[in-house]
């Protein structure tokens, strides 16, 4: 057998695996999330995130690393299917559990989705953010209910308020884009209620007002209120209250007459 290299072998050896050409012209900016969508060699869009020492590339659909554990879209789907199968066979959830190793694998998988939904939020792909944050909330619910170790049941709970906040922002952003500001405001209120219940569940109601996630959602709520259609009657009532407060009775009388005409 000849030991001489063929032209194809030489070409293969000459191909560099250096990622510098990919990063050329895309400098890392500290304090900023640098993300972009590109078309992969397979023709499928990918999400790239620029890091200080390179980049992170993720699939936009399915598990971010493109793998299908146990033939399922993700480990979460695999364990959810296993739970449903257990319920069909036994008629109850009792007896179903997640081991320490399984919970660890679920946490590592959730980090992948975390990176992706952060990138998608920057790109204003809000449906993708809703999908991935909702999915990670299901991981928290599964582990908190079925993990055999108390540590595994609680360790992810520290992120629940944050994930609720990101999910709420994404849903409200979609509704605002559609011009449905009243519904968006209700979405924000619902998110705040969920976070309040979370703190109450652990007896930490006092932390609700100090929560960064709560402040973000309250700020979003204020912005949405500014965009709400003005109700003429409510506006007159507000002006009437101000007139009475400053003892401008002539203006107050005029405003009362206008309110009567409206009713």
Image (cartoon, rainbow, N blue to C red):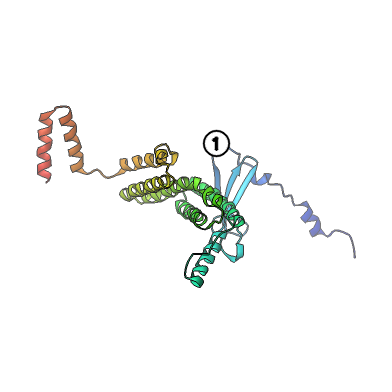
Placement of the N terminus among the 4 image quadrants:
bottom right
Image side of residue 135 versus residue 56, left or right: left
Residue closer to the observer: 47 or 137 = 137
Q: Quadrant of residue 249?
A: top left
Q: From where the camera sits, is residue 9 visible?
A: yes
Image side of residue 51 versus residue 128, left or right: right
Q: Position of residue 52 (x, y in %)?
A: 62, 39
The mark tally for this picture is 1
Q: Secondary structure at mark 1?
A: loop
Residue 130 vertical placement versus 209 (above, below) = below
Judged from this view, the residue extending furthest toward the bottom is 89
Residue 6 vertical placement versus 150 (above, below) = below
Label 1: how many Cα within 10 Å (few below 14, some 14–19, many 20+): few
Q: Residue at x 49, y 71 (%)?
A: 88
Residue 198 vertical placement versus 63 (above, below) = above
Q: Residue at x 54, y 38 (%)?
A: 32
The residue pinned by badge 1 equals 31
Q: Position of residue 121 (x, y in %)?
A: 48, 47
Q: From where the camera sits, is residue 123 visible?
A: no
Image side of residue 68 versus residue 240, left or right: right
Q: Position of residue 253 (x, y in %)?
A: 9, 34
Q: Residue at x 40, y 51 (%)?
A: 171
Q: Residue at x 54, y 48 (%)?
A: 155
Image side of residue 234 versus residue 169, left or right: left
Residue closer to the observer: 36 or 10 = 36
Residue closer to the observer: 196 or 148 = 148
Q: Position of residue 80 (x, y in %)?
A: 52, 63
């Amino acid at each position: 057998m000849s030991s001489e290299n063929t032209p194809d072998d030489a070409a293969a050896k000459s191909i560099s695996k250096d990622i510098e050409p990919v990063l050329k012209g895309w400098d890392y900016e500290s304090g900023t999330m640098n993300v972009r969508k590109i078309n992969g060699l397979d023709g499928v869009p990918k999400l790239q995130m620029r890091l200080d020492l390179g980049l992170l590339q993720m699939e936009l659909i399915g598990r971010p690393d493109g793998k299908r554990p146990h033939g399922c879209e993700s480990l979460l789907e695999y364990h959810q299917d296993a739970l449903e199968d257990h319920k069909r066979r036994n008629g109850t959830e009792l007896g179903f559990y997640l081991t320490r190793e399984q919970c660890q694998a679920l946490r590592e998988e959730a980090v992948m989705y975390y990176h992706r939904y952060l990138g998608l939020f920057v790109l204003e792909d809000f449906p993708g953010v809703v999908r991935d944050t909702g999915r990670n909330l299901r991981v928290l619910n599964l582990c908190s209910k079925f993990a055999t170790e108390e540590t595994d049941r609680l360790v992810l709970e520290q992120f629940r308020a944050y994930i609720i906040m990101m999910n709420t922002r994404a849903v409200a952003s979609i509704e605002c884009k559609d011009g449905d500001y009243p519904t968006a405001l209700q979405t924000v209120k619902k998110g705040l209620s969920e976070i309040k219940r979370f703190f109450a569940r652990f007896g930490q109601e006092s932390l609700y007002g100090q929560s960064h996630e709560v402040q973000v959602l309250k700020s979003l709520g204020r912005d949405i209120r500014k965009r709400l259609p003005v109700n003429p009657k409510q506006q007159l009532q507000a002006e009437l209250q101000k007139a009475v407060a400053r003892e401008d009775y002539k203006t107050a009388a005029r405003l009362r007459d206008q309110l009567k005409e409206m009713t």
